[in-house]
Amino acid sequence: MHKKLLIPGPTEVSQEILNEQAHLLIGHRSAEFALLYGGITSKLAEYFKLPADVKPTVTTSSGTLWFDIVGRSLVKKKALACVNGAFAERCAETLRACGKETDVLSVEWGMAVKPEMVAEKLDSGEYDTLTVCHNESSTGVRNPIAEIGSLVRKKYPDVIYAIDAVSSMAGDKTFPSEIGCDVIFASTQKCFALPPGLTVALVNDRAVARAKEVQNRGTYTDLVEIFEFEKKHQTPFTPCIPLIYALDKRMDLLLEETYDKVYLRHLEMARYTQQWAKRHFEMFPEPGYESITVSCIKNTLAKNFKELNQKLGEKGYVISNGYGKLADKTFRIGHMGEWNLQGIKEVTGLIDSIWGL
C-alpha cells in the first residue's frame, strides 16, 4: 500500500505530475528544449513577480547544492551563517567546506533568528555574505526573513543576503522584492510537489556581479556560468529533462491557483494543525514563529511515535519523527505541496483515534 506523505519532504506527488515525466526525451541543446525551459523560467518570473534585475534558474540538484554555490560563488572573504536548526547548521558547515571563513550566529533550537541579533553581528563590518534558513524544518521555525532583509538593505548594502527556502518556497511568502534578498532557493520535492531532483533559485544581478569578483567558483557551482547559459534558455550541464516537463506542468497549476491562494491554503492547514497540537500537546517553536509548511510538535504525553506511524501506515499515511536530537521528543506533520485542509483533518483525526486523544 502506498503511504501518503505528510512528512517535511518529499511530499505527495499527484499522478498528473508523475505522468508528465513520461514525455519522450529531447536534446538539452535543442531548440525544443530552449522553448520548454524558457517557458518555465518565464512562468517562474510571473509567479514570483520578479523585477527585471531578478532572474530564475533551475538546477538539477538537491537544494544543498546551493549551499555550495553560495560558498563557492558568493562569499568573498567571510560569511555570517545564522543557525537555529540542523539545515542551517549544514549550510554553515558547507560554507566552511568551500574554504570560506564562516562565523555562526547560533540560536537555540526552537527559537527564531531576530533582526537585532543579525545587526549585532553585522555591525562589525567583517562579513560580505549573510545566510538564513527561512523555514527550518528540523524545528518547525519560520525565521523573519523580510524583517532581516529590510535591516540588511538599509544598514549593510554591501552584504549579499542568501536564503534557504528549501521547504517554504511555493507555499509560504517568498517574493524577493518583499524580502530584499539577493538569492533565494528551494527544492522541488517540498512545496512544489514534484519528485526530488530539481532546485529553483531566484537570483538578482547584484549576486551575479559579486560572483564575477570571486575566484575558484568551481564547475557545477559557477553562478556566472549558470546565468550565461540562461541567456540561451539552457543549463550549463545536462538537466533532468523528465523533471523539467513536470515542473512546467506544476508552474501551470500554480499560476492557475494563484500565489495568494496557494499561500492561504498553506496558512489554513498550518493554523488548523497548530490549534490541534495545542489542544493535546505543545508546539516546539517559540510563539509567533511557527512554520506554515511543517508543524513540529512536542511529544508532551510521551506517546510511542513508532507505533503511531506504524498504525498510520496501515491507514495509508505517514508523518515524521523529530529530527536528530529531537527524535521522540517531537514529531512533525508536513502540510505542503498539494495537501489541503481536508487531508490534514483526516490525518489528525486518525492520530486522535490511535492515541485516544
Image (cartoon, helix red, strand yellow):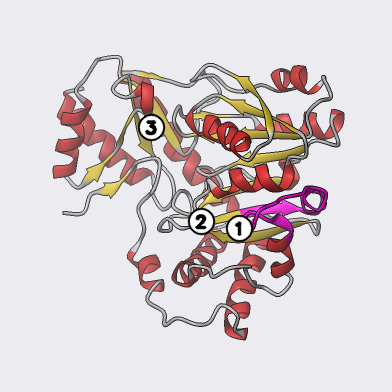
Q: In the image, 43: left or right of 181?
A: left
Please tell me which residue is depicted at 26% across the width and 41% down the height of the picture.
318
Please tell me which residue is depicted at 26% across the width and 39% down the height of the picture.
347
Residue 50 vertical placement versus 243 (above, below): above
Q: Which mark is residue 220?
A: 1
Please tell me which residue is depicted at 56% across the width and 49% down the height of the picture.
65
Q: Which numbered mark, 2 or 1, is in the foreground of this view?
A: 1
Residue 25 vertical placement versus 337 (above, below): below
Q: Which numbered mark, 2 or 3, is in the foreground of this view?
A: 2
Image quarter of the C terminus: top left
Q: Give the x, y percent position of residue 227.
A: 72, 63
Question: Given the image, on which type of amino acid does mark 2 rest?
Answer: Ser
From mark 2 to mark 3, how far is it between C-alphas? 31 Å
Which stretch appears magenta? 201-224
From mark 2 to mark 1, how far is it between C-alphas? 10 Å
Residue 27 painted magenta: no
Q: Give the x, y percent position of residue 289.
A: 55, 25
Please rate how many residues cluster around mark 2, counting C-alpha atoms within 10 Å: few if below 14, some from 14 to 19, many from 20: some
Secondary structure category for the residue under label 3: helix
Q: Which mark is residue 273?
A: 3
Q: Which mark is residue 68?
A: none
